[in-house]
Image (cartoon, rainbow, N blue to C red):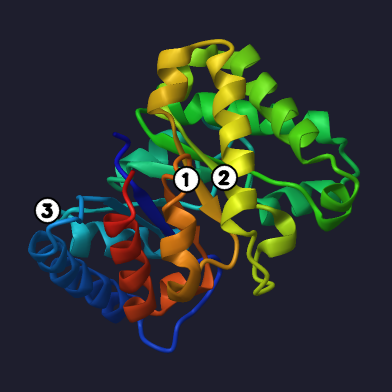
Amino acid sequence: MRKPLIAGNWKMNSPDESSKVLLVNVLVHAQLLEKRILEEKDASDIDIAIFPPSVYLKEAQEILTGSKIHWGTQNVSAYDEGPYTGEISASMIRGFGCDYVLIGHSERRCLYETLELDQYVLDQIVAKKYAKAINQGLTPIICIGETAEDYAAGKTEEIIARLLDVLIEHQGPQALAQTVLAYEPVWAIGTGQSATPEWAQKVHSFMRERVAKHDAATAESLRIIYGGSVKPENAREIFAQPDVDGGLIGGASLEVEEFSEICFSAAVSTH
């Protein structure tokens, strides 16, 4: 059985509370959550990771070291070092005790799209970052999803397949065992419009089947999480789907009580 993962992406937000206070609150609620899970006979353990802005990584390391909470960055460079102003290498990220890194989030892709790069080139950039992450022992969470226009045109599977094929071409299917895939339909991110549980399951199943064509064992163990307006009200039904292994949470991750409730939903929705 795959262990659920709930990842909280803070994005570039400055909460009303200081980052230290928010991190401590996350830690306290995680400890309460652990107790709650132990008391619930049908609940299973989960992994929790948070992704604060990089300027808060030192604080995350200081506060969360020794806890069960993982942390990571929202991006990684495709290069090891050099004249790449503003970039952060995988080795630098590892130096802050990070276990995870987000790669290919649609909001990052939009920045590259302003350079008028085509989608295949964007996928190649994602693949290069993926290689740097796994070479440093980081677990990449690779985001993929279709726009509203692509969704309306029925191109979801085409877009999913394209990136998966590039990743497999670069590192082979077995490397995906060190990876988490995140299905994030762009039309559901920050819009309040979440995919239905049935739609999430359909896409996640397609992703797993695509990997299984190359390596069945890797596909079976691969964690595929869903992101896009996940809230306490819809989390349990989404996470109950057989191929949904948790969630990538945006705005709700800054509301600690909401985030904790979403985590609990993952713990009681294991399959």
Q: Which residue is mark 3?
A: 66
Q: In terms of secondary structure, where does tag 2 sit?
A: helix
Image quarter hosting the N terminus: top left
Residue 152 shows in the view: yes
Q: In the image, is 13 to the left or to the right of 203?
A: left
Q: In the image, is 261 to the left or to the right of 122?
A: left
Q: Which mark is residue 212?
A: none
Residue 86 shows in the view: no
Amino acid type, residue under disc 1 in the picture: Val
Q: In the image, is 234 to the left or to the right of 256?
A: right
The answer to whether 76 is drawn above or below residue 71 in the figure is above
Query: What is the crowding at mark 2: few (fewer than 14 residues within 10 Å), some, or many (at least 20)?
Result: many
The answer to whether 257 is drawn above or below residue 263 in the figure is below
For the residues labelled 3 and 2, the Cα–Cα distance comes to: 35 Å
Q: Are marks 1 and 3 in contact (CB under 8 Å)?
A: no
Query: What is the crowding at mark 1: few (fewer than 14 residues within 10 Å), some, or many (at least 20)?
Result: many
Q: Determine which quarter of the picture holds residue 57.
A: bottom left
Residue located at (83% from left, 57% from top): 148
Image quarter hosting the C terminus: top left
Image coords of residue 123 (percent x, y): 72, 31
Considering depth in this image, is 252 or 11 the residue closer to the camera?
A: 252
Residue located at (34% from left, 63% from top): 265
Q: Which residue is mark 2?
A: 201
Q: Are marks 1 and 2 in contact (CB under 8 Å)?
A: yes
Q: Most extreme residue toward the bottom, as rendered?
A: 16
Residue located at (59% from left, 12% from top): 213
Q: Which residue is mark 1?
A: 244
For the residues labelled 1 and 3, the Cα–Cα distance comes to: 28 Å
Residue located at (79% from left, 31% from top): 158
